[in-house]
Image (cartoon, rainbow, N blue to C red):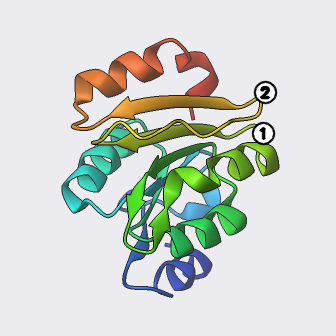
Amino acid sequence: MNSNFFSLAKQSSNAYFVGLPGKNVKNMHSKKVLIIDDEIDLCHLLKSYFLRKNYEVYLSHTLEQGLSFLKTLQPDIVFLDNNLPDGIGWNVAPVIAKDYPDTRINLISAFHPTLPEMPASAHFTVIEKPISLTDLDRQFAGSAAQLKP
């Protein structure tokens, strides 16, 4: 594993890189997925789903660390929970959409919060928890060509 990614991942016990065994991250040309959610089980579900599709997967369980990863990694896909231990994730979604216009944002929540006012050009989806693999297939089937690593 590339030591730069490993050291980045080890900056916080609340966030880490999940790679594919035996793969050198430098040589991977896959899409990046950043999951910002404090629910460990959901993170593992999403991680497993995207690793099987050969994505690089990054996890963060706090908003602060997730935003730090966002700046460093500039992922292709972001899953952003609303209620995080250190803030309201959806409040930063419009800024993410503006600053990273090519990033697909998936706003996730078990509740029905008010949708933030997103830029007209934003690529975003709202996914209600609990999330299943069927939900993921449905959400990503329409744009499979765009999301293939």
The amino acid on which the numbered mark 2 sits, given as a three-letter code, is: Ser
Residue 59 pos. (x, y %): 42, 63
Residue 24: x %, y % from top left: 53, 64
Residue lying at the far top of the rendered structure: 142
Disc 2 on helix, strand or loop? Answer: loop
- Within 10 angstroms of label 1, few (less than 14), some, or many (20 or more) residues? some
Mark 1 vs mark 2: give the one in front.
Answer: 2
Question: How many numbered discs sit on the rendered protein?
Answer: 2
Quarter of the image where one finds residue 83: bottom left
Question: Label 2: how many residues lie within 10 Å, few (<14), some (14-19) or many (20+)?
Answer: few
Q: Which residue is pictured at 33% across the width and 50% down the height? A: 47
CB within 8 Å, label 1 to label 2: yes
Q: Distance between the residues labelled 1 and 2?
A: 7 Å
- Front-most of residues 15 and 7: 15
* Residue ID at (43%, 72%): 16
Q: In this rendered view, identify the residue nearer to me: 107 or 30.
A: 107
Provide the residue designation for mark 1.
101
Q: Residue at x 69, y 68 (%)?
A: 72
The disc label shown at residue 144, or none: none
